[in-house]
Amino acid sequence: MNRQGNVATAMPMGAMQPGAAPSGANNASISNNNAGGPPGGAPVPPGAGDGGSGPHALDDPNVYHWICQLTYGPQKEQALLELGRKREQFDDLAVVLWSSFGVMTALLNEIVAVYPMLEPSRLSNQLSNRVCNALVLLQCVASHPDTKHLFLQAHIPLFLFPFLNTTSKQRTFEYLRLTSLGVIGALVKNDSQDVISFLLRTDIVPLCLRIMQSSSELSKTVAIFILQKILLDDVGLGYICATVERFYAVTNVLKEMVEHLAVSPPPGRLLKHIIRCYLRLSDDLEARRLLRSALPEKLRDNTFTTVLADDVGSKRCLAQLLLTLNDEAQQTQQQQQQQ
Ligand code: TRP
């Protein structure tokens, strides 16, 4: 792999032997150091890190310790938690996780081990938390520009589908779905075509649709965010508008959400995403034609006027959507009159 060079410099395990690490007394200054640069007075091993400007994960001896624990045990569960806590602190944690021997395998093991437990009576809080901590680390790898594509090439998102496919409303399952969606959300965040093309080869759209229908508010928001990102991509829009069945599968769920939001204020971020999904659908000519009758009435009347009062962006999107559909309606009428 052509990234090997990077990886080698990012993982100078030898430089981080416990003996070379700063003493425990220095740990406080390490964790208090958020400003970037080397922690207070601690020697920085030459070549450590990947040349980025923030603090490097491997300058923190605890990171090395928890990576070893995660790979070899016995404190795997605590290692998942502790490394998850470090992800905000170090920009390069994703690179370290990806390139450290055995770490990805350990994370995938955590995930696969839970598959047989995906029944409400078997999935304990502790187990759900544990696997969610593993997912948080996968999300870290999925978000980083240097590891995202490797993560995708290794088809790791497929490991999340059994979790996305669950339907139990139990909190443990909600948490699992939300965290798994977070990984996919991180992948689609900075639009890249390869991510979308990969996802379109999976069943992500029907899974998102089901979550948008029946999961918690938070999961619904991440699921519709993913759908919106797919729609914004030209291939994604083409995929959804390729058949009438797909178009209606999507718009029926959007419509259901609108109906629900109309009676359960406040709609929060969901409405914003819904409007943008409709607007993007209207870029496809056939979808535009069908939307004239498929758009929920509640988006045409004043149901959401007050809700949208301080969201200029969404108000504009809605106005543009209605205008586009209206223009189309007038044109069709004119054509019919001419015939
Ligand atoms: N294999 C199904 C299809 O190609 C996947 C699917 C089910 C789907 N429901 C969908 C795709 C809704 C897009 C929208 O149609």
Image (cartoon, helix red, strand yellow):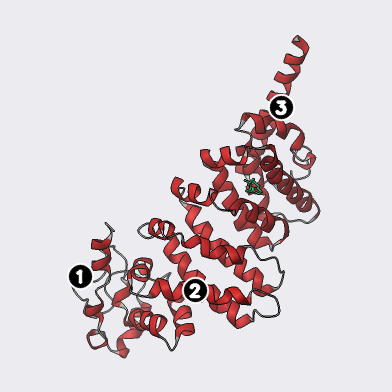
C-alpha separation, residue under disc 3 versus residue under disc 1? 62 Å
Q: The residue under label 1 is which amino acid type?
A: Gly
Q: The residue under label 2 is which amino acid type?
A: Ala
Front-lying residue, 269 or 328: 328
* Residue assigned mark 3: 326
- Residue 94, above or below 31: above
* Crowd around label 3: few <14 · some 14–19 · many ≥20 (10 Å): few
SS category of the residue bearing label 2? helix
Left/right of residue 238 with respect to residue 6 in the rendered view: right
Front-lying residue, 53 or 130: 130
Whole-percent x, y for residue 198 in the image = 49, 51
Front-lying residue, 103 or 229: 103
SS category of the residue bearing label 1? loop
* Residue assigned mark 1: 47
* Residue assigned mark 2: 134
C-alpha separation, residue under disc 2 versus residue under disc 3? 49 Å
Residue at the farthest right position = 263
Q: Can you tell which quarter of the image residue 148 is in? A: bottom left
* Crowd around label 1: few <14 · some 14–19 · many ≥20 (10 Å): few
Q: The residue under label 3 is which amino acid type?
A: Asn
Sequence order check, earlier mark of 1 and 2: 1
Q: Are marks 1 and 2 in contact (CB under 8 Å)?
A: no
